[in-house]
Amino acid sequence: MTNHWLDLKNAKVILIEGSNAAENHPMSMKWVMRAKENGATVIHVDPRYTRTSKVADIFAQIRPGTDIAFLNSIINYILQNKLYDEEFIIDHTNALFLLRDDFSFNEGLFSGYNEKEFKYDTGSWAYVEDEAGYPVKGESLEDPRTVFSHMKEFFKRYDFKTASSITGIPEDTIKLIADTYINNRPGTIMYALGMTQHTVGVQNIRCFGVLQLLLGNVGKPGA
């Protein structure tokens, strides 16, 4: 999370993942409990049942290292059911920007991959630019060339059934978490080394960023 501890009391839902805040960040839990007193729902996703799990309203025991599948299924659910904050993502993200025609993603690899060197040439990972060098925007999110459309295509592989088979969390629990987090805004996410200290730690946190931007949970109290 990027807000002050005190701001936790303004959240209507708090997702704690990769963190045992009750034991390792007890000062944060003071304000999580204040949020609960105000009616907030606390969700804890972790391989272990801890003191944080005990105070959570919803606990999901996840297989270690499978957070991406879990979060991506929620992101896909938001995208497929148009549960995102359209005004926010148009005004405050790159969702409408057009990507180059030579950008692609196929069978786990993005365009520009060099098999011999095991590296990417990221030249195709760029926006279409106008004569002044500024990104060109599409007329709507439905334009297949936009960042948003490419993202929607990328995440569609992650339905709840797939996520459940990877994470070990029951499908109905994933859906409950998704609906709870989506329908109680503003929401905030608390994480710690359980999310960052992985070879895919950057991608773990990127999922949080995508989720928060889709729901408009940025730049406001409790978000």
Image (tube, helix red, strand yellow):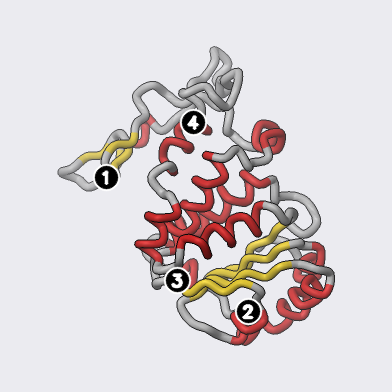
**Location of residue 102 with respect to 62 vertically, above or below:** above
Q: Which residue is mark 2?
A: 21
Mark sitting earlier along the chain (4/2) = 2
Say whether disc 1 or disc 2 marks the residue closer to the N-terminus: 2
Task: State the mark number for residue 119.
Answer: 1
Where in the figure is residue 12, as x and y percent of width and height?
76, 61
**What is the crowding at mark 3: few (fewer than 14 residues within 10 Å), some, or many (at least 20)?**
many
Q: Position of residue 8 (x, y in %)?
A: 76, 67
Cα distance, mark 1 to mark 2? 38 Å
For marks 1 and 3, the one nearer the N-term is 3
Q: Secondary structure at mark 3?
A: loop
Q: Residue at x 56, y 56 (%)?
A: 208
Q: Which mark is residue 149?
A: 4
Using the image, determine if residue 60 lies above or below residue 52. Answer: above
Callout 2 secondary element = helix
Determine whether the residue tagged by mark 4 lies in a helix, strand or loop. Answer: helix
